[in-house]
Amino acid sequence: AAKAQGRNNYRYFTASMQEEALYRRRLGNELRQALGSDQLALHYQPIVDLRSREITKAEALLRWKHPELGFIGPADFIPVAEETGIIVELGDWVFRQAARQVAIWRREFHPAFQISINKSPLQFREQGNDIHSWIAHLRSLGLPGQAIAIEITEGLLLDASSTVTEKLLAFRDAGIQVSLDDFGTGYSSLSYIKKFDVDNIKIDQSFVRNLSAGSDDMAVCEAIIVMAHKLGLEVVAEGIETEGQRKLLMDAGCDYGQGILFSMPKPADAFAQLVSTHQEATQRPSDLLV
Ligand code: C2E
Ligand code: MG
Ligand code: MG
Ligand code: MG
């Protein structure tokens, strides 16, 4: 009986692996069309200054609304985009969308508004001389490098090849800030942070999820914040869902927060609405604030 069951499991396993492979192939084929249509969009999530409550930054998160399969998240299609190589074009599209949007929000909201975009390690390695075309593109929109930040993960820094180092330096030379995303989940070696000279660190949401006073996660967050500040880096905490988490992180000296407590990632028009309402509220005299 055990053997029969094992065989069933095996059959089930291979069937689902085949389905998975077919699904990925389908996504790979259709992603190219999606890129030329209006199926892809960037959603924006505010990065909130924990002390002033100002919103002067946002993270751009890619969304794919597939005509038949419905909404597909980046965790599903970014790996496919990497396998098929379309990631380079996709990354370029994300950059141009974000640049166009940040130019508008610098005029409408804040002259120093910044949008951060994610770059996966493979995307980063494959990107050819695009850095220079990106910089030229920003210049053509009248934007300084500071208008855009790139979020990379620690995995990239493990690859200490000179091309990675050179590309990171080229971004930083152009004023484009480099953020270390999902900090604490990878290798988190202090030597990487020093060596690559990033501008800020994003504490991974896994440390924020169960945050409570005196917990191990709290100790980790506090240590990251102290270390980052000593190195002259700013800290963003990701995945803030509750007022309690916000308060603990603010009291620990964390600079910025991001998460559904403030807002879900939203389409550009809804994000703009959120920021204007928020600006009115924070600019009102404090006695009017509840
Ligand atoms: P990430 O860069 O770490 O982005 C944060 C993720 O946490 C986003 O998931 C966001 O929607 C989610 N999130 C935000 N607030 C909360 C919260 O309060 N609680 C919880 N539980 N989650 C929250 P999303 O949008 O599904 O993106 C997943 C990942 O896909 C991103 O992780 C990023 O690594 C990647 N990604 C997204 N857009 C792009 C892109 O344009 N290019 C590349 N290469 N990767 C992207
Ligand atoms: Mg990110
Ligand atoms: Mg993250
Ligand atoms: Mg992540």
Image (cartoon, rainbow, N blue to C red):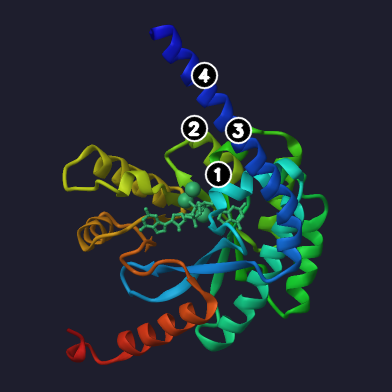
Q: Residues within 10 Å of mark 1 (few under 14, many from 20)?
A: many
CB under 8 Å between callouts 2 and 3?
yes
> Does label 2 point to a residue whose CB lies under 8 Å from ligand 4?
no
Quadrant of the snapshot with the N terminus: top left
Name which of mark 4 and mark 1 comes first in the sequence: 4
| SS label for mark 1 | strand
Q: Amino acid at mark 3?
A: Leu
Name which of mark 2 and mark 1 comes first in the sequence: 1
Front position among marks 4 and 2? 4
Q: Residue at 74% of width from left, 45% of height from top? A: 166
Q: Which residue is mark 3?
A: 158
The one of 220 and 42 positioned closer to us in this rendering: 42
Quadrant of the snapshot with the C terminus: bottom left
Q: Which residue is mark 4?
A: 10
The image shows residue 12, relative to residue 58, as above or below, that is above
| SS label for mark 3 | helix
Mark 2 → mark 3, Cα distance in angstroms: 8 Å
The one of 52 and 62 positioned closer to us in this rendering: 62
Q: Which residue is mark 1?
A: 153
CB under 8 Å between callouts 4 and 1?
no
Which numbered tag is attached to residue 187?
2
Q: Residue at 46% of width from left, 67% of height from top? A: 265
> Does label 1 point to a residue whose CB lies under 8 Å from ligand 1?
yes
Name which of mark 4 and mark 2 comes first in the sequence: 4
Mark 4 → mark 2, Cα distance in angstroms: 35 Å
CB under 8 Å between callouts 2 and 1?
no
Residue 37 place in picture, x, y as percent: 72, 69
Q: Residue at 73% of width from left, 72% of height from top? A: 138
Quadrant in which residue 262 is drawn: bottom left
Quadrant in which residue 173 is drawn: bottom right
Mark 3 → mark 4, Cα distance in angstroms: 36 Å
